[in-house]
Amino acid sequence: MYTGLLHTHRLVVILFVLLYLIKLILLLNNSLAYEKFAQKVKVPEMIISTLFLLTGIGMLTQISEITTFIWIKMALVFGSIPVAVVGFKRKNKVLAILSVVMILGSYGLAEVNKKQKSAKKELTSQTITDKADPNYNAVEHGKVVFLSYCQACHGADGKLGLSGAKDLTLTAKTDAEIMEVLQNGKNSMPSYKNTLSADEMEALAKFIQSLKK
Ligand code: HEC
């Protein structure tokens, strides 16, 4: 059900973006063709926009948690609607460009997010990440999560210390305190509240403790 919706939503979004790109190009060229085209696509445009919203709302009802990422995406999409309406009706080029940039931006965000998710999947696919599995090893699990999220600042061995990051092999923090830092972030270290699950944070704490020995 969800994948079906997702595919339909993607297809509709691509049609929507194409339509607006064509309209924008015609508008920017001051072309007479703009009026003609806009008139011609009025009905298809209404259908595509409605499907865009309906499939989007359908997907929202299927996901368990609305992340910050989804909020940003929705804000961009909903924000772009009034901008597009005014921009294209009044032939205000700046607003028309802005609305297309907002839509493209939210589309780009979705693609980046998808890549990050599949990168994470690849790394974790060879590691047991289910705590209930008898062969589960928290340190191993923590290591794969660490390599995808933390090594940019802390280095693969925890010692790198980029942008003021602490050398993790010297940390005096307990598991609970490490999980706290992950929840809330600290100074230039971001919060992982919306990215990592509780199991992943616990595994990270175990992995960091293992670096000390
Ligand atoms: C953008 C860079 C950056 C990333 C990415 C990052 N950190 Fe940090 N981390 C920092 C900085 C900077 C500090 C020092 C914060 C402070 O105390 O001012 C820090 C501190 C910590 C501390 C506390 C160490 C101590 O002894 O005080 C822990 C634990 C930690 N990071 C774990 C992680 C884990 C696990 C990840 C991956 C999920 C991660 N960090 C990702 C920059 C980063």
Image: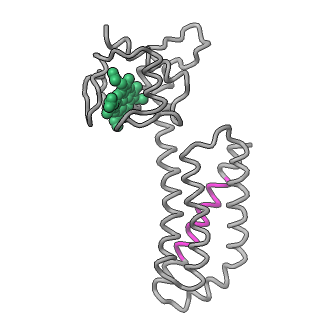
| Residue depicted at 47% across the width and 23% down the height | 179
Would residue 6 be seen by someone viewing this image from the given angle? yes
In reply to whether residue 17 is colored magenta, the answer given is yes
| Image x and y of residue 45, in percent | 67, 73
Apparent side of residue 145 relative to residue 44 in the rendered image (left or right): left
Question: What range of the chain is rendered magenta?
Answer: 8-22
Quadrant showing the C terminus: top left
Quadrant showing the N terminus: top right
Q: Main secondary structure of the magenta part?
A: helix
Q: Quadrant of residue 34?
A: bottom right
User: Would you place residue 63 above or below residue 48 in this image?
Assistant: above
User: Would you place residue 72 above or below residue 116 in this image?
Assistant: below
Of residues 31 and 77, the one nearer the viewer is 77
Of residues 108 and 61, the one nearer the viewer is 61
Q: Extreme bottom residue here?
A: 32
User: Would you place residue 161 above or below residue 62 in this image?
Assistant: above
Q: Quadrant of residue 13?
A: bottom right
Apparent side of residue 59 relative to residue 147 in the rendered image (left or right): right
Q: Quadrant of residue 47?
A: bottom right
| Image x and y of residue 207, in percent | 41, 16
Apparent side of residue 143 relative to residue 14 in the rendered image (left or right): left
Would residue 151 be seen by someone viewing this image from the given angle? no
| Residue depicted at 54% across the width and 8% down the height | 135
Ligand 1 shows up in the quarter that is top left
| Image x and y of residue 60, in percent | 69, 47
| Residue depicted at 68% across the width and 44% down the height | 3
Q: Across the whole image, how many numbered discs are drawn on residues?
A: 0
Of residues 16 and 173, the one nearer the viewer is 173
